[in-house]
Amino acid sequence: MSSLVRQFLYAAAAGAALAGSAGAQLLPSVSLPPVSLPVPTGNVPVAGPLLQNILAEPAAQQAIRPTLDSVGGLTETIAQSGASNLLELRRLRLQELIRGNRATVENDGSGLPVRRGIVAVLDPDPFGLQRALGAGFRIARDDRDPALGLRIVSLAVPGRMSAKDGLKLLRKVAPELRADFDHLFEPAGGSLATMTGAAAAAQGVAGGRAIGMIDGGVASHPSLAGKSIEQNGFAGAPRPTGHGTAVASLLVGSQGPFRGAATGAQLFVADVYGGNRAAGSATAIVRALGWLSSKHPKVINISLVGPQNRLVQHAIQIVQARGIEVVAAVGNDGPAAPPQYPASYPGVVAVTAVDARGRALPEAGKAAHLDFAAPGADMAAALPGQGYAKVRGTSFASPLVAARLLFAGSPAALAAEARPGKGRVGRGIICGACRVDPRSVGAK
């Protein structure tokens, strides 16, 4: 057994201990030689034989530890490996995100990544805030968002306390405060793929209808040349990413045989990563929603996934009350994974993905509700700079539904376009003809 595979197996064991989620299918423990990872040695539980074979593939390394050179998503082999294996890969990925960013990220106690030493409070009561400060909390950031009419206060926990213990203490000393972790959200397909040296998409002339997206930054690409694109950063300056570029191209791109589903629309891009995979926090998403709301788009696409968070939920409710539709991907961790957000919030249009034969992708997540499906495999999307990639995942289905919703006007009107599919596709497949064959554009 290779050293790399052994490391992944130990990571799987540690991830299982961290996550503690239901649905794991582990074999009895076996003895493995020590490896250079900060996890226990000796007899440890290991993932099933099929996962062991999968972990030997380079694609599994990409799924667990996203790098800077791919936006493609899971391979067919991994996607078809079964719900328990997909759940195990999720645990490994989240564990690696926490382990690789210990200075800024920690475990919330259930395996989910959150900002280290930070709890966030929504519209704090002044007396409760004073009691929190008296208990040793300090204000790390105080955001007043006029667009949403919200105040978000990020509190640093006392001393060396964990975010988990800090939230417990805050709820004890000031139970009236609406507080939560500052959870991290991930791209729902492929890797973030920050492209060092890639130029940001140039801002073009104002277009017609407006659509927004919360994602990584968008790079320049011939399909986006001359488009009306405005970017703003909420985790530092906007930084071009593969994931953001692919999603933007599926919305407004056009070059030869490649066409997005909302060509001609004005696109507002809210970058919540700033080129850092350990960003994408709940507070950044709330600020992004505020900025996008001020631009008055008809629809906002969010191809990101994370846990339930009361700050994000409240901000989305405000946006929805203003007549802005929110569309979100259900994720790619399989049906055994917990429901992902914001797709699972009431009123958010939850989107899954299908392949070229109209079959629901086996890795698609299971949201609290499911509205529509759209092409999310056997298709091309833009790569930063030039060229196209063959992409797979619900991230790439969501913008197609968002684009069609922009023109349909409402989910009820969009449902009239839905066509039957195979498997869990909600009310049906939207924009089935929007898939661009990878061969037609020479996708890698």
Image (cartoon, grey):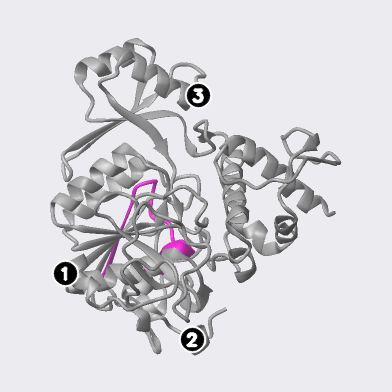
| Residue at figure coordinates x 45%, y 56% from the top left | 187
Residue of label 2: 441
Q: Earlier in the sequence, mark 1 or mark 2?
A: 1
Question: Which percent across, then down, holds residue 42?
Answer: 82, 34
- Residue 421 sits above or below residue 211 on the image: below
Q: Which amino acid does the dot numbered 1 rest on?
A: Gly
**Above-or-below relation of 212 to 105:** below
- Where does label 3 land, which residue? 162
Determine which residue is flagged by label 1.
Answer: 409
* Quadrant, the C terminus: bottom right
For the residues labelled 1 and 3, say whether their Cβ atoms are less than 8 Å apart: no
Q: Nearer the viewer, residue 347 or 265?
A: 347
Q: Which residues are magenta?
A: 228-247
242 within the magenta span: yes
Q: Position of residue 43 (x, y in %)?
A: 81, 36
In the picture, measured across the screen, residue 274 lies left or right of residue 43, that is left
Which label's residue is closer to the chain start, 3 or 2?
Answer: 3
* Real-space CA distance between mark 1 and mark 3, rounded to the nearest whole angstrom: 45 Å
The three-letter code of the residue at mark 2 reads Val
| Residue 326 magenta-highlighted | no
Which one is earlier in the sequence, the residue at label 1 or at label 3? 3
Real-space CA distance between mark 3 and mark 2, rounded to the nearest whole angstrom: 49 Å
Residue at horizontal 85 percent and vertical 54 percent from the top? 1
SS category of the residue bearing label 3: loop
Residue 97 as seen in the image, left or right of residue 142? right
- Element class at badge 1: loop
**Between 238 and 112, the one nearer to me in the picture:** 112
**Looking at the rendering, which quadrant does residue 138 occupy?**
top left
Rendered residue at 52%/60% (across/down): 193
Q: Amino acid at mark 3?
A: Ser
Q: Quadrant of residue 175?
A: top left
Q: Position of residue 334 (x, y in %)?
A: 52, 57
